[in-house]
């Protein structure tokens, strides 16, 4: 079987795939309502929140767009904290819908500095919301969201968090860290296929929503909330993904969120120690290294594309290439969701065999 080691979509356990073979049910019926309620209840436990969690049918980017258009009005100023491709995407969405975006970019491979956020908020008092990526998948860096949140809340700003590749895998207590909006996507740590986004909204977020005038229809949170009260979604949901989620969330709660976070930390340690012992560089320092994806590089000489081709052809292992400015310079090992120590050991053994063939010298 192929070892799919990209940072999403991730492999799904057999029980989850089996759950998806179920016949369709009426998405306006009681059986679906019970399922949706159960799924939302479990999501709230993993988000560690008492806030509303909305189920949206769409990709993670849809969840990000939904957050932007439901919280902001054209002309609002946002501070867009970016440490990579997904931070830039959040900023681009806000700009597309007419926000004035103040970019605060950090070097790729480094986390955002909370004091720089403080300085920016002091310089631009008109900022209404701060956009932050919790885990930057393109560089394998996890931001210190607790400290960033403290900086944002000193200035009483709205905190909107892209947690697409962290929630469910890396500790993110949404309420304790005062996230007004936190977004995740089904194909990441949740062990289910792509197709749904989950978005939590705080009371302060709902107050901002009341004022927000950006155009929206499909993503309208008022419609989502009103329908959630009837245990429904405004539009036809990805019913099969909801089946999958009901199963995966039971598995996740049975394992326990602290155990899940510890497992992700363990596989990360194995990945990073293994990469080092192969003589390869790691993009992120230990203190900010992501527990869901490890970025290896940067390389200037050897052909990363060739390495990934050999890994696929000879080891049935799919690794991810670099994105944006890091295209061709790094590769990434995804280790989130349904992942265990032996999966990563196998990737490392395959890499050891493939590296010399691709022209990498230890
Ligand atoms: N944000 C982050 C941090 C991500 O890793 C991704 C997916 N790689 C997205 C947003 C976008 O998610 P999607 O591809 O589901 O739109």
Image (tube, rainbow, N blue to C red):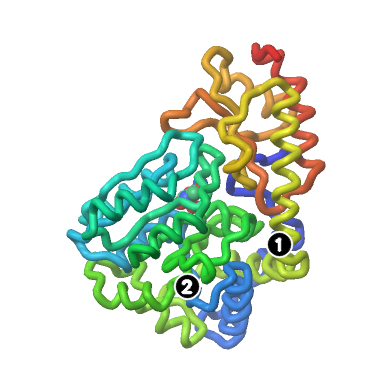
Can you name the residue that lies furthest to the left here? 75
The residue that disc 1 covers is 16
Report the side of 328 relative to 71 (left or right).
right
Q: Nearer the viewer, residue 162 or 121?
A: 121
x and y, in percent, of residue 79 in the image = 31, 53
Report the side of 76 relative to 317 (left or right).
left
Which image quadrant: the C terminus? top right
288 in relation to 362, above or below: below
CA gap between label 2 and label 1 equals: 21 Å
Sooner in the amino-acid sequence: mark 2 or mark 1: 1
x and y, in percent, of residue 98 in the image = 21, 56
x and y, in percent, of residue 121 in the image = 30, 55
Residue depicted at x 42% and y 33%: 324
Residue depicted at x 47% and y 86%: 229
Circles 2 and 1: CB atoms closer than 8 Å: no
282 in relation to 211, above or below: above
x and y, in percent, of residue 197 in the image = 49, 62
Kindly identify which numbered label has been placed on residue 336: none
SS under mark 2: strand
The residue that disc 2 covers is 54
Q: Nearer the viewer, residue 306 or 131?
A: 131
- Residues packed near mark 2 inside 10 Å, few (<14), some (14 to 19) or many (20 plus): many
Residue depicted at x 61% and y 42%: 287
Residue depicted at x 27% and y 65%: 72
SS under mark 1: helix
**Splitting the image into 4 quarters, where does residue 226 fall?**
bottom left
Report the side of 19 relative to 73 (left or right).
right
Which image quadrant: the N terminus? top right
Q: Nearer the viewer, mark 2 or mark 1?
A: 2
């Amino acid at each position: 079987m192929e070892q799919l080691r990209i940072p999403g979509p991730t492999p799904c356990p057999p029980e989850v795939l089996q759950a998806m073979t179920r016949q369709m049910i009426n998405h306006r019926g009681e059986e679906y309502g019970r399922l949706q309620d159960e799924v939302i209840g479990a999501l709230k436990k993993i988000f560690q929140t008492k806030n509303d969690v909305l189920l949206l049918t769409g990709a993670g980017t849809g969840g990000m767009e939904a957050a932007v258009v439901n919280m902001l009005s054209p002309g609002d100023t946002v501070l867009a904290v970016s440490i990579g491709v997904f931070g830039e995407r959040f900023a681009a969405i806000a700009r597309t819908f007419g926000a004035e975006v103040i970019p605060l970019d950090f070097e790729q491979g480094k986390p955002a500095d909370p004091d720089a956020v403080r300085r920016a908020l002091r310089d631009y008092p008109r900022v209404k919301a701060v956009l932050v990526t919790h885990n930057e998948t393109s560089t394998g860096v996890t931001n210190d969201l607790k400290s960033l949140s403290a900086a944002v809340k000193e200035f009483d700003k709205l905190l909107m968090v892209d947690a697409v590749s962290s929630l469910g895998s890396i500790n993110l207590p949404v309420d304790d860290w005062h996230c007004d909006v936190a977004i995740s996507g089904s194909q990441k740590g949740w062990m289910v296929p792509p197709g749904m986004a989950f978005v939590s909204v705080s009371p302060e977020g709902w107050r901002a929503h009341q004022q927000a005038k950006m155009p929206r229809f499909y993503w309208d949170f008022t419609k989502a909330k009103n329908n959630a009260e009837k245990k429904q979604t405004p539009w036809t949901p990805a019913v099969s993904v909801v089946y999958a989620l009901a199963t995966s969330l039971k598995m996740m709660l049975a394992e326990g969120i602290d155990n899940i976070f510890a497992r992700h930390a363990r596989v990360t340690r194995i990945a990073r120690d293994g990469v080092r012992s192969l003589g390869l560089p790691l993009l992120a320092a230990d203190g900010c290294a992501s527990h869901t994806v490890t970025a290896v590089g940067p390389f200037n000489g050897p052909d990363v594309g060739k390495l990934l081709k050999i890994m696929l052809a000879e080891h049935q292992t799919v690794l991810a290439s670099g994105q944006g400015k890091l295209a061709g310079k790094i590769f990434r090992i995804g280790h989130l969701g349904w992942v265990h120590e032996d999966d990563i050991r196998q990737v490392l053994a395959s890499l050891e065999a493939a590296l010399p063939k691709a022209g990498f010298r230890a």
